[in-house]
Image (spheres, helix red, strand yellow):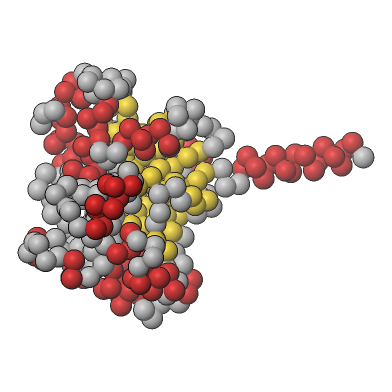
Amino acid sequence: MKKTLLIICCCIYGMVSGQNNTELLVLGIAQDGGSPHINCYKECCTLLRAEGRKNQVVSLGLQLHNEKKTYLFEATPDLPNQMATLTKNNGYSLEGIFLTHAHIGHYTGLQFLGREAMGAKEQTVYALPKMNDYLTHNGPWSQLVALKNILLQPISFERKVALENEITVTAIQVVHRDEFSETAAYRIETKNKKALFIPDIDKWHLWEKSIVDEIDKVDYAFIDASFFDQNEISYRAISEIPHPFVIESLALFKSQPKAFKDKVYFIHFNHTNPLLDVNSSAYKAVIEQGYHIAREGMRLKM
């Protein structure tokens, strides 16, 4: 009887410690400017201000629960809150930060690691060559490097970065406005699951890869949903912001099976995007078609 009990306990412990030890956590869903957005006085933003609510800028986190370690994807202007959530108020360590590109919503949170704020000690930051060069040779980011607040870890496209527990992260080049750096998507792989993170990209047809093929390779795909359709962009030239509209993605994926659509999580919403409103007809239509809409606090087993 004691032997049987011991075996059962060991099996239960093995299931807890060995399976699904890792979770992917959605830390933010908004486009670079956040929501409410600066200089927006439409209802989409004024209501949030009146209620003291906000949508944090797009970011994902990886939590390794047994090891009490974490990894962060993007250093956003909301980094202080996102870091606290990810690390369980410093109960878990932050092992590294992966950056996609040098647009304000994706790297400027690094400022909080400097001497004016956290004064971090050699916080590992994974960066592609142009991003690495940009941070090293341009202030105020160069001060973070000089004072060793951050420790830049060079990475390359299509080369796996090995983390703990056979977890790997691979940078994938995507087409986007590359004024100061290249732009990456990331494939995150564990022994159990694979996730794709593409917060920023230009139109799908401009990419040398097939988004359908890339989604086929993973279990979860967080993809750029900056704008629902062209009606949102009355205040800027559409050529300046050539993100794939959600309606374009829906049309592209229309013939795909239910299992494919179940992998898709729309993310990186402009403040005008009706998918931020759970009561909108657009939100309900996307959900009814079998897709997911990323929400802050969402957790997925990896």
Q: Residue at x 43, y 59 (%)?
A: 220
Residue 148 percent location from the top left of the image:
25, 21
Number of numbered markers: 0
Residue 116 or residue 205, whichever sits in front: 116
Using the rendered view, name the quadrant where residue 224 is placed.
Answer: bottom left
Q: Is residue 87 visible?
A: yes
Residue extending farthest to the bottom is 255
- The answer to whether residue 204 is above or below residue 19 is below
Residue extending farthest to the right is 1
- The answer to whether residue 235 is above or below residue 192 is below
Residue 2 percent location from the top left of the image:
89, 36
Residue 259 or residue 38, whichever sits in front: 38
Residue 191 percent location from the top left of the image:
52, 49
Q: Residue at x 22, y 30 (%)?
A: 111
Residue 274 percent location from the top left of the image:
29, 64
Q: Residue at x 26, y 62 (%)?
A: 273
Residue 29 or residue 243, whichever sits in front: 29
Left or right: residue 9 compared with residue 35: right
Left or right: residue 19 compared with residue 137: right
Left or right: residue 136 compared with residue 61: left
Could you tell me which quadrant the N terminus lies in?
A: top right
Using the rendered view, name the quadrant where residue 212 is placed.
Answer: bottom left
Q: Is residue 261 visible?
A: no
